[in-house]
Image (cartoon, grey):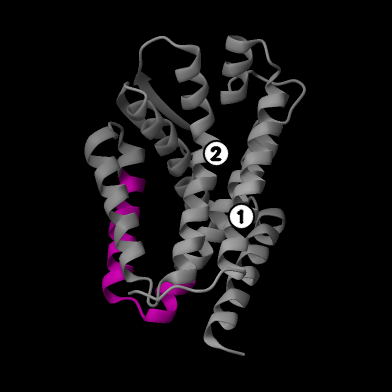
Amino acid sequence: MDARNHLDGKLLFALAAAAAAGVVFWNTWPLYPFKLLVVLMHESGHALATLLVGGSVDRIQISPDQGGLTLSRFPPSLLRQIVISSAGYVGSTVSGCALLYVAARTKEGRWPLLALAAWCALTAALYVRDGFTLLFVGGCALALGVLARFGASWLRRAVLVFLAAFSCSYALYDIRDDLLHLAGPGGTDADALARATFIPAIVWGVLWGAISLALVALTLRKILVNAPQAATA
């Protein structure tokens, strides 16, 4: 078995392990920080979409109960609202897929972890206003930076692969738990779009879930079928 096949096998195993962890260990403390990190990806998706459509972001907040909030302002427009609301769930899947692709191409995992640390630090500096979010996001920046600088190569790659797999899996769990409902408090992104478009929330949930599954499938196909590129550090 060559090195690429060995890495592909680890990627597939990590993806399956992350999915299993979500079912078996969903409410256990070891997964708690990873879940909050994916919530941060979700909120960052809203923030980035807001900026791309000409709006501004006031703050990003993560709560201890794994909730998240992005306060932003943008010119009134149904299209802008659809883009911004969709960017949370789909954006977290895109982040996971990007990590999966990078995990398959990187040799040691140092620069992707440094990029994640920089993202956390920049988010904290620009958009975090409350203590809990600052503590969590700042702690993530520090932990990822230390791991990138001092961690063993195998540990860096293992953490990167798990983060990628878990973020993809969690995004799908998030859609299932928060969106595919027939009745609820009405506080999700899908509910907001349902009120704006008169299209039921469950339709938006199914659509985002289908897009997310397609993105994961395309990413895995790109990794496993296409010829490998030169590995980088």
Callout 1, which amino acid?
Leu
**What is the number of the mark on residue 67?**
none
| Circle 1 residue | 218
Tell me the quarter of the picture where residue 174 sits: top right
Q: Measuring 38% from the left and 80% from the top, which residue is drawn there?
A: 153
Is the magenta region chiefly helix, strand or loop? helix
Residue 168 location (% of width, % of height): 58, 52
> Would residue 178 be found to the left or right of residue 30 on screen?
right
Determine the image quadrant of residue 150. bottom left
Of residues 23 and 230, the one drawn nearer to the viewer in this rendering = 230
Question: Which corner quadrant of the image does residue 186 belong to?
Answer: top right
Q: Position of residue 73 (x, y in %)?
A: 34, 17
Q: In the image as oriented, which residue stretches furthest toward the right?
A: 182
Residue 148 in the figure: left or right of residue 208? left
Quadrant placement of the N terminus:
bottom right
Whether residue 92 is situated above or below residue 130 in the rendered picture: below
- In the image, which residues are magenta? 135-158
Q: Residue furthest left?
A: 125
Which residue carries the number 2 mark?
90
